[in-house]
């Protein structure tokens, strides 16, 4: 798969991440915040089950060799989705996305700098620092009412 296609898919993923909290918050008005989060994960789990059954090439046996922390992705996802369901109606989608993206970029730079989780080391440079500062300033402008 080409890098251009991967970037285009990630842009689509970004759109999905921006739209999902608003959809889930709307559902939460009918069923409750935690219930909406659970329903979101249940629907996603069913969709992924279909994808795995049709195209999966991995093995379930590998999960027994996984460290405990390698299994926390779903917990972090549930935390994230639930927080967006609670905050989007109060702060607005743009403000929540601005805060999320700022946190993601700062955490990503930290993870890269230390090469955590076995990923490639990418040093924290002045340019990266400036990028985070500028993004934080942009987020502050969006969040400010």
Image (cartoon, rainbow, N blue to C red):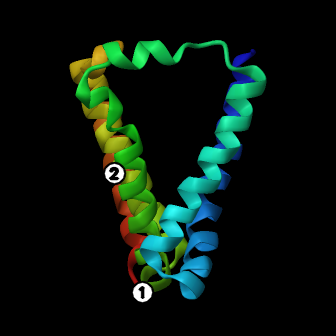
| Secondary element type, mark 2 | helix
The answer, for residue 123, to whether it is visible in the render is no
Task: Name which quarter of the figure residue 17 lies in.
Answer: bottom right
In the picture, the quarter occupied by the N terminus is: top right
Counting labels gives 2
- Percent position of residue 45, x then y: 59, 45
| Secondary element type, mark 1 | loop
User: Which residue is located at x 34 percent, y 17 percent?
Assistant: 64
* Residue in the foreground of this view, choosing between 103 and 42: 42
Relative to 22, is 67 above or below? Answer: above
User: Which residue is located at x 75 percent, y 16 percent?
Assistant: 2
User: Which residue is located at x 56 percent, y 87 percent?
Assistant: 29
Task: Name which quarter of the figure residue 139 lies in.
Answer: bottom left
Q: Which mark is residue 43?
A: none
Relative to 14, is 85 above or below? Answer: below
* Residue in the foreground of this view, choosing between 115 and 56: 56
Task: Name which quarter of the figure residue 121 lies in.
Answer: top left
- Real-space Cα separation, disc 1 to disc 2, in angstroms: 20 Å
Q: Which label sits in the foreground, 1 or 2?
A: 2
Residue pointed to by mark 2 = 103
In the picture, the quarter occupied by the C terminus is: bottom left
Q: Is residue 50 left or right of residue 67?
A: right
The answer, for residue 5, to whether it is visible in the render is yes
* Residue in the foreground of this view, choosing between 8 and 118: 118
Outermost left residue: 114
- Percent position of residue 100, x then y: 41, 57
Residue pointed to by mark 1 = 145
Relative to 140, is 89 above or below? Answer: below
- Percent position of residue 68, x then y: 24, 28
């Amino acid at each position: 798969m080409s890098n251009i296609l991967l970037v285009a898919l990630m842009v689509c993923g970004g759109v999905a991440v921006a739209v999902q909290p608003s959809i889930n918050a709307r559902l939460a008005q009918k069923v409750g915040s935690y219930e909406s989060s659970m329903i979101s994960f249940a629907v996603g789990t069913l969709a992924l089950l279909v994808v795995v059954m049709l195209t999966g090439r991995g093995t379930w046996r590998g999960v027994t060799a996984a460290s405990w922390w390698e299994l926390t992705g779903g917990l972090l996802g549930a935390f994230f989705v639930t927080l967006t369901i609670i905050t989007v109606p109060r702060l607005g989608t743009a403000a929540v996305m601005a805060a999320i993206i700022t946190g993601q970029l700062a955490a990503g730079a930290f993870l890269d700098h230390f090469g955590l989780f076995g990923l490639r080391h990418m040093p924290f440079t002045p340019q990266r620092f400036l990028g985070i500062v500028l993004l934080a300033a942009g987020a502050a402008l969006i969040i400010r009412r």
